[in-house]
Image (cartoon, coloured by chain):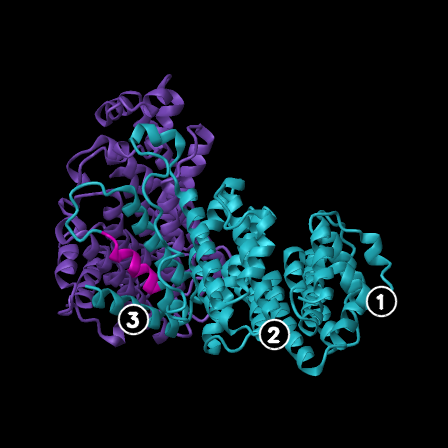
Chain colours: A cyan, B purple
Amino acid sequence: MSGGRLDTLAHGLWHLHRTPDLAALRSARSPDELARLALIPAARNLGIAAAFLPADLRTEATAALLACRVLDAYEDLSDRPVASDALLTAVGYLTGATDSPPPPLHAVAERDSEAVDLVLAERIRDVRALLSALPFEGRERVGQMLVDVGAVMARNLDSPLPRVVYGEGVLGRAVLYACSLVAEEACAAADLGELAGGIGVTAQLANDLRDGELALHDAGDREELTRAVMLRLLAPALGGFALLARLGPRTPSRGARAAMAYMTITTTAFLCAAVGAPAPYRRRLRLGAAVLAARSPVHWTMMLERVRRAADGAIQRLLDASPDLAAATGRAVGSGPAAKVLSLGDPRSMSPSMGPLIVGTTFALVQALPEEPLTGELPDPQVRRMMIADHLAFGALERLRPCDADAMRALATQFQLTAVETV
Amino acid sequence: MTVVSPASDRVTVDRPSLTAPPDRLALVADRMHEILVTGGTFDAIYRHILAAPGKRIRAGLVLACARLLPSAAAVRLSDAVDLACTMEMFHEASLVHDDICDGSLLRRDAPSVPAAFGVRTAARAGFHLAGKALEVLARVLADNPAVFARLGEAPGVTYLDRISDLSFGQLVETLPPAVDNAALRRHYELVAGAKTGTLFRLACSYGGTAGAVDHDRLRALMRYAEQLALAFQIMDDVRDVEGGPSLGKEAGGDLDRRVPTWPVIEWLAMRPGAREIWLSERSSSAELQADLVHSGATRAARAVAVRAADTARRAVDAFPPSPAREQLRELSLRVVSR
């Protein structure tokens, strides 16, 4: 790893949990200085991950990240009636499609991240300069991503989209961009889009949980939000792990692999912490684990396996019986082995297409159920296995657009064929 | 099989034959048999399921909602029947899996599918059945692109992309909160809205869309479905406590598993010392059952169900008078009088 990257990483880690210095951001004397100062406050762990990248990729990724934060500011902090117009104007200005900047934002930030976003929106001209300084190919790549992301954000402002659709369209699209930046072709374009969407939804749900977005999930309190988010994660996380299993060996840059590993580890750790489950790695080991995972496909697979097991542990912890009732029903809390769901099988050999991937995992869970006729209540792990299989299967339906008859037919066929084939 | 001629099968409100729900539910029964019993792997299971049909409430909801408005844009009766079959098949699939999760040996006075055919086979059959439902739904949507063009666009309306709320409800039901009245009521409403309400809402949203109902009134149907589901679920709980020949399975199953049903929540609120009894390993289900009835908890629960049914009935005032609207109102009455 080069000295420059180490400097950036050290600077990033130093600033990761500190209050952002807004005055410094405002007084940055050039777009490059702004980028250097804003990356960690604006993108936090993603900023750390970006620091792993080789210089050319880092420059492009940084510009893309800051541009996305500007869009986020216009999405969240614009006056509602004009928000989608302002957002689309921001997209046009950042990509160079128009020379008219969007109207300035007058919101008062409630969180540090919003305060940073507001400064970036104030300095949209500098963010545009960062983008326009990219080589043509990078400019095109980032520009198309911003157009796509902006369109979904604008639709969401006009009429709130389901969180899965929003997550696929915004962060999923950003993940797809990242894949195009760092990796060779991991799978067919359609599959790649779906699997990247899985990572996007996972990240979006984690953000919703971090930000306490109760209303978006019809949750009455933090506990309900945690359940809603964690149980909605199953299908997208399955897709995310399938993509990560393929991306590791197909990402030529070791720094890029370390960046992906770092994001995977920290996001999983956050979700584990939300339910009090053990993280895949202790905090102080995460950076080293990411660097180690980037060393070889074997190390990558070991890291992913550990993360998948931790994710299953988090689901298991969430589903452990209510302590109040454990005594009355005679069931021990957390009794029995954890049902493998996200750590079931080898993701490298699983289908890269979301439908078959979910159906395959659903029936793998069913395969572990007893064959004999039911004679009474099943042990808890078996009950849980059936419930999770059900939820995973319905999660496949969740991903279909309600009027997409072709996709429905394809999924219907997969369910029926797999049910018959596994008899 | 009842044949419906293409020339006369458009769903409208002025056709007397369509105002007789049992006729149309017979169409649903015939069509489900046609869809499911095809000489395939799961024929025996499907025959077993079809031999003991439920009340076909979800089918009734689809068929009524599809003819709430006189509209040329509505789908043909045969397609409305197929939509009704779709909701019933999703429901039956979820029941097969419920029986595995609950360890239920009986369903509608007959051996449950997992008890009769084995757990793993039952699980597979459930997913096969859900696949069948999806296939039929896809066919209806593809054949009626204009009617379903705006499917998924109405905010606050449940579409297929929320069907995982059903399994979410099943999982959350296993995670009751601490024994605190407000938390238990909130938990109950969440679970009932997800487990029972999801398919009720889907039946109303797809039925209503099939009948060219506008977005505002689809939302009225969502309120109807939500409250109907609450009334339905509470009455189901009351019957599980009270038992009786119409239950179709052994009473007290929820008490055995210490599920905090609505009668239990009322009981915990009104009966001094109930919390300790509820949490005691020594309290038998029979004792709990007797105490719930004796304390007036089941009566209080029934009153809540009646209020929910009233609210449901008022929600369909958004529609002009019609036999279909009357049918929805009658259904809300029937739910609390069973």
Q: In the rendering, at what x and y percent does residue A16 appear?
A: 69, 51
The amino acid marked with disc number 3 is Thr
Tags 1 and 2 in contact by the CB under 8 Å rule? no
Going from N to C along the chain, the mark reached first, 1 or 2, is: 1
Between the residue at mark 3 and the residue at mark 2, the CA separation in whole angstroms equals 35 Å
Q: Is residue A330 above or below residue A400?
A: above
Residue occupying image coordinates x 20% and y 33%: B243
* Disc 1 secondary structure class: loop
**Most foreground residue, A21 or A173:** A21
Q: Chain of mark 2?
A: A
Residue occupying image coordinates x 30% and y 45%: A381
The amino acid marked with disc number 1 is Ser
Q: Which residues are magenta?
A: A359-369
Between the residue at mark 1 and the residue at mark 2, the CA separation in whole angstroms equals 25 Å
Q: Is residue A308 above or below residue A50?
A: above
Location of residue A81 by image quarter? bottom right
Residue position marked by numbered label 3 in the rendering: A413
Is residue A360 in the magenta section?
yes
Residue position marked by numbered label 2 in the rendering: A181
Residue occupying image coordinates x 40% and y 45%: A316
* Disc 2 secondary structure class: helix
The amino acid marked with disc number 2 is Leu
Task: State the mark number for residue A30.
Answer: 1
**Chief secondary structure of the magenta span?**
helix
Q: In the rendering, at what x and y percent does residue A257 appear?
A: 57, 67
Going from N to C along the chain, the mark reached first, 1 or 3, is: 1
Q: In the rendering, at what x and y percent does residue B284 appear?
A: 24, 25
Q: Chain of mark 3?
A: A
**Most foreground residue, A362 or A408:** A362
